[in-house]
Image (tube, coloured by chain):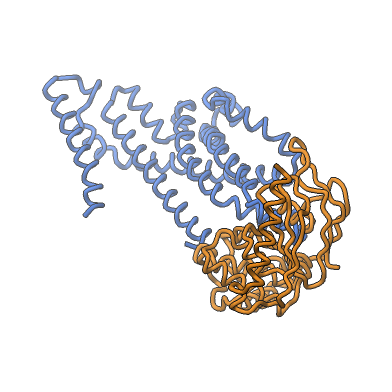
Chain colours: A orange, B blue
Amino acid sequence: MTASLTNVEVDYRGRGRVLGPVDLAIGEGEIIALVGPSGCGKSTAMRLLAGLEQPTRGVVQRQAGRGETSLVFQAATLAPWLSAAANVALPLELSGLDRRTARDRASEALARVGLSGVDASRPAQLSGGMAMRVSLARALVTKPRLLLLDEPFAALDEITRRTLADDVLTLWAELKPAILFVTHNVEEAVYMASRVVVMTAGPGAIAGEVAIEAPLPRPAGFRVTETFRADAETVSALLAKGMERAA
Amino acid sequence: MKSLTALAIPLVFIAILLAVWEAVCRLSGVPAYLLPPPSAIGASLVEGWPLLLSSAWNTLFTALTALIVASLLASGLALLTALSPVLERAIQPVAVTLQVTPVIAVAPLVIIWAGLDHPERAVVVLATIVAFFPIFSGAVTGLKAADPDLTRLFDLYGAGRLQKLLRLRLPSAVPFLLEGHKVAAGLAVIGAVIGEFVAGSGGAQGLAWRILEAGNRLQTARMFAALFVLAVMAALLHALLQLAERRALVWWRGR
């Protein structure tokens, strides 16, 4: 088990319950897509697993060692004053690794996400897709056991997001971290995940989950198969049910 | 071509204004001590140029000294408030109270403290007080302006308080600090002029003193000439700082 939420609830002062009760277990090397309507607490669940928030009730088990959990946000969230390599090296340097080794490993991580030769570029000089790859490289540079992706492709165009989804799967095949990613896009969830967990509207609870049987990484034509369509419909139906329950 | 037109329009407007001013003075016979014609102001400018230039340098030197002192004090205090919420709560009200107190009301006290024989010190202190706040409030705001998600990442990667300050909060504050310094530079000149006026003695030989001196002697053309030099100096300083801010932002953002 890489991480888990057990009977977890989160209350915010003035807003009442925003999440839970939720039970979610993330196995070694598993890719889980978390889908649900806006405000259902998906990002809160992410922050709990990252240790950035504490639950009001319940137990969170997570990878708490330095660099063992990484996080990628919807925006690339790069420091504009640092080069791409310096941004990627940041987690290593913060953990005390010497600058030269950190930069070397950052260059390798950038090359792994297909960005050789941009080490010295600043975020403002990169396209949205490239900046997101830098963000991905930063998340992977520590070789995390759990990678949390909070709507990482939401701000990108369709072609870029599909390419990046494939890249994430290729990187996963190399490093095999467990991945939990939040998305609003049902097709993206079915394409990338080994398991899709559907949440109800806020306060979010688990409405159900769908195991995607096709082996990872998926072949190029997976999006047009009957299995893909059937799984996407099941997830959509669960999502609709979750919304009804909230209404 | 477009930029030439943009430059020509205000120049033509100023030329027309000066021509009308000159004509009104000559035709109406208004006394020169009341409203001197531009030609008399020009002559006074040429005649008093060496003295005006050295006075301008005095005022500029005072303003720049005040800017440096204010920068060090304001940035240092802002850093302290960033390190400790208790210090922030202690310093903020004092800073705000000082800010809303008119500097001219504090001036007599500063002159006494600086020593009546050293009006130039009082002028620097007064200009520093005026220049302090834009830098302080810019720095305080900037130190709190780090991207919340980037801050979360620093937390996730186990960054300590000092690491966060040096590697996240300080760099995030750079645009705010630059803006604060740009505003403060203009205010330092104003502060220096106010200080010289209040000091009201030949000990502070800046442009404001030249204006006072010429006013006392009813040399209105000389007053205008000093005023002109002061305005040009302030405009040049502002332009210089704007350029520096733009360059520094390009360096900060990488383009």
Residue A46's spot in the image, x, y percent? Answer: 74, 56
Q: Residue at x 63, y 65 (%)?
A: A188
Image-based side of B188 in relation to A171, left or right: left
Image-based side of A173 in relation to B141, left or right: right
Is residue B246 visible from the viewing direction of this image? yes
Residue A122's spot in the image, x, y percent? Answer: 54, 66
Q: Residue at x 49, y 34 (%)?
A: B191
Viewer-proximal residue among B242 and A149 = A149
Vertical comparison of B140 with B30: above or below = below
Image-based side of B146 in relation to B121, left or right: right
Image-based side of A97 in relation to A108, left or right: right
Q: Quadrant of the N terminus of chain B?
A: bottom left
Vertical comparison of A37 with A149: above or below = above
Residue A164's spot in the image, x, y percent? Answer: 59, 70
Vertical comparison of A60 with B134: above or below = below
Vertical comparison of A189 with A100: above or below = above
Residue B188's spot in the image, x, y percent? Answer: 49, 38
Is residue A64 visible from the viewing direction of this image? no
Q: Residue at x 84, y 60 (%)?
A: A4
Instruction: Indicate the quadrant where residue A236 lies.
Output: bottom right
